[in-house]
Image (cartoon, grey):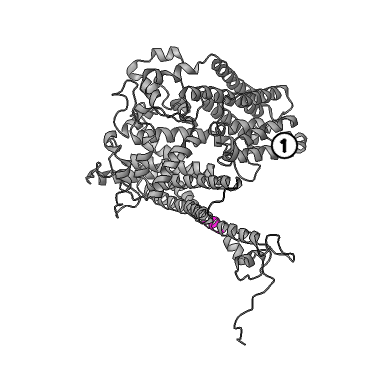
Amino acid sequence: MALLTGKSRSSDGCWTCRLRRKKCDEVRPVCKACDALEIDCLYGDQKPEWMDGAERQKEKAEWLKLEVKRKAGQRRERRYLQMLEHGVESLNVSQLEEHSDQEDETHHHSPHDSASSAYSTQPRGSMEPSAQHSEQSLMSTLTSPAPPSDTSAGPAMGIDERELNMVMLYLDYVFPFLFPFYRPRLVDAGRGWLLVLFSRNKALLHTVLSLASYFFNIVFSQRSQAGIEDSPACVTHNWDELQRQQEIALKELQAEMQRIIARGVAGYLAETNRVMASVIQLLMFDVAVANLGAWVMHLDAATEIFLLIFKEYATSPPPDSHPCFISLLIALGVRPFSYTPKGHPWSADQASLRFSTALLLTVDTLSATTLQRVPRLYDLHQHLLTEPDEAMRAAIPDGEKEYVLPHINIKEFVGIHNWVLLSLGEIAALDAWKKEHRCSGTLSIPDLVSRGAMIECALRRHLAALDLEDPRGEAGASEHDFPLLAFIAQPGQTDTARLAEMSVWMTRIWGQALLTYLSVVVSGWQASSVEIRTSVALTIKLLRAVPQPSGGCMRTLVWPISVTGCMAALEEEASFREIAAAMGPLRTVGAMSQALSIMEHVWANRAAVEADPEAWDFAVCFNCLGFPALLV
């Protein structure tokens, strides 16, 4: 009989190690192996139900393998976030300006061929290659071998057939779901700028491939629930692919962030703009997959990069030195207003900047309601979003309109009017002001009420104006002007007129929810007040009457649904459960599931809320799950 030279395997090890067929050190309550892998460690005298030596045990073992891989990915991301946190702290404007001045001297003496490298180095004020050159064939740019000298840049980026298919899946299905209102005109080159950026930036490419893989996992899950058995190897491979693509994206983005920290933004506008786009897409990935801890860091990083870009390129020369977004757009490429009847066929980098700016303004403002702070971009709201009335528009000379009119029309990107975001920013700022002065003992209630009344008056004026708005006149122009475009449009494509009608509905729902939010900020948590009950009932009525709602459009209503739902009466709870259920499996994409969990938590604690209403507000609700929720 052979002698045993080591400690014999004990039968007292945790059930998790036994399932994995690994030796357990029997440390309690959590063994070292499970602790290192960050997985559940289960001890007990009674055998778990799934430890049946048959199919359930096999399924549990397969699930545990995926869980180990998922936790490994989370550990890698934590290391990346630690780097990113250090990087954001290092993005000091004054330091970067000093370093950039030194860099400029070097770069002015270094020739670069901007036509051959998408990551070209250009002095401030120089122009990017023309849009015609940059809109080259996706196949030729993506399938060329990557240059060995720079793994992060350039249009020559190797990509295999499966990844190309996933890129198209993202463009055809994922992107329209995440951004249902973004329908750029054909004469503006549509969404072609996305393909150009994918070919130029590895971090961005692999982030969207991760998102596409995540959607594919949802498809597999639904097929399984419908009784359609897919190959386990295929399901596992797709999950592995998601992890692999995310790991590559984080690695590439880490390298790009380090380059920004080292060299600054002056002379590197296009490159920095693409890095910002990558961070924002990673932020949207956080929202889509409910990555609970990462979104604040990614939002802060994207905001810091945007502010650096804006300070360097979007400020008019002295003595005025006022914000000038058009200067930033011009610095990215050809002047966008000079050669089409309607004015702006954006280059890829210009389109990317506008899209990123719109998303960043939206997410920054929404996040302020959770993080209890003034939106970080609040000082730019008036310049970027304010819409002058008709009399002011008529008084602006034609040659100056591009400098004065709002540069970002949020409706084109998110589906709501600019005044919604402006009002939300004002209320969030008022809430932060109220809490700051209450903590210092200097809060003036009359001042608070007066400020709130001004915002409420503007909100009600905007809501009244919506009743007079005819979305068909604005939406139908392009189709009437170019009937051929309507003729060749795909039958399943979202109708422009219906999107415009949906935009009005979305805006009205947001506006009504803002009145509820404002009431709580000014008057406190008074769920039984006539004002709150009337506003909640009207919002529910509007939500039920949304014409032909799609999952994507309803996803853009998560914040107003959450605000209204938290104030719902007992008999109104079912309406919000029905709204979430109506989205089907896609409610797991984005914040709708979190929103329902928040509402359920508030409803379950009605007694505590009624006993101490002063301890509750919407920021408390949006953090009640143990982490800050980004309801976007």
Name the element at disc 1. Answer: helix
From the top left corner, tell me how far across and down residue 130 is, in percent.
27, 34
Q: Is residue 440 visible?
A: no
Of 79 and 593, nearer the camera is: 593
Of 367 and 206, nearer the camera is: 206
Identified at 58% across, 42% down, the residue is 588
Picture layout, residue 253 above or below residue 313: below
Q: Where, by quadrant of the figure, is residue 336 drawn? A: top left
For badge 1, the amino acid type reads Trp
Q: The C terminus is located in which quarter?
A: top right
From the top left corner, tell me how far across and down residue 511 is, in percent.
58, 24
Q: Residue furthest bottom?
A: 1
Q: Main secondary structure of the magenta part?
A: helix
Q: Is residue 26 visible?
A: yes
Q: Is residue 272 magenta?
A: no
Q: Is residue 567 left or right of residue 157?
A: right
Of 332 and 455, nearer the camera is: 332
Magenta residues? 68-72
Identified at 57% across, 20% down, the residue is 459
Q: Is residue 339 left or right of residue 427?
A: left
Q: Is residue 69 magenta?
A: yes
